[in-house]
Amino acid sequence: MDYAKLTEVIRRLALEAGDKIMDIYDADDFDVKVKSDESPVTEADEAADALISAGLRAAFPDVALVTEEQSASHSETANTFLIVDPLDGTKEFIKRRGDFTVNIAYVVDGKPQRGVVYAPAKGRLFYTQADGTTVEETGDFAKDSVGATTPLKVRTPDNDALYVVASKSHRDQATDDYIAKYKTADMKSAGSSLKFCLVATGEADIYPRVGRTMEWDTAAGHAVLLGAGGDVIRFDDHTPLTYGKEDFANPFFIAYAPGVELKKA
């Protein structure tokens, strides 16, 4: 893979998809449908999916592509693939809460190698560079030129005063019970893959997820966190969270900054 080209393409497609999403988000009304698994899907999901899929297939025709909105058509997985959630946080989008993201990642042998997470309503753009390190870009997000970037590195955690981030729409008692095992200084809630990015920036130390997610929900955020020195492991046995599973379903997991004294479930 030409990682310089990959970075350029996924950054641009994420920004273009974000524009399309915001056009619909800012409209007076938009259509919401219910998928077979009873999760919501909007015209923004579908428009962003079509744009990103076309762009990735044009740029990387020989790389397998998995997207949330087309996942039912994937009968087998590959060792190397691109994986997309065109609008992560659809519930946040519908409620106009802003915590939704565009996610594109590249996976090799079960591990996310590169990724981009763009939160268009919040004006935050995170991605891995060609060398695998993660940056947050600021500025006007021009499609063909990169603005000012800040290298990201996870915080050195204080285990007597940890910063925890948890899901906004999927918070439950099991999550609270696990968080209670830690000494916390601050707790915040966020939607979508932004939670991985908050650990990557040092705004949080740990993000436990005791709930259902799919690979397209997590791959890009996982890549962003890896590039900032963090990691993501399974909740049950603390082994690495891997990708390319037959049904694309994730086990529960913990995203964290090294130095956090992890607790068993």
Image (spheres, rainbow, N blue to C red):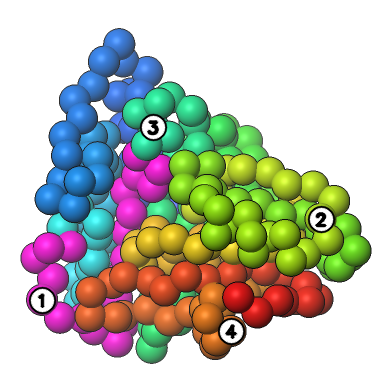
Please provide the residue range marked out in magenta: 71-90
Lower position in the chain sequence, tag 4 or tag 2: 2
**Viewer-nearest of labels 1 and 2?**
2
Q: How busy is the neighbourhood of tag 2: few (under 14 within 10 Å), some, or many (20 plus)?
A: some
Nearer to the camera, 99 or 146: 99
**What is the three-letter code of the residue carrying label 1?**
Ser
Q: Which residue is mark 1?
A: 75
Determine which residue is flagged by label 3. Answer: 93
The residue mark sitting in front, 3 or 2, is: 2
**Is residue 117 left or right of 155 when viewed as pictured?**
left
Assess whether mark 4 and mark 3 are in contact (beta carbons under 8 angstroms): no
Q: Is residue 136 above or below residue 251?
A: above
Q: CA distance from mark 1 to mark 3?
A: 29 Å
Q: Which residue is rendered at x = 37% and y = 36% of the image?
A: 91
- Across and down, in percent, residue 4 comes to 48, 68
Mark 4 — residue? Answer: 238
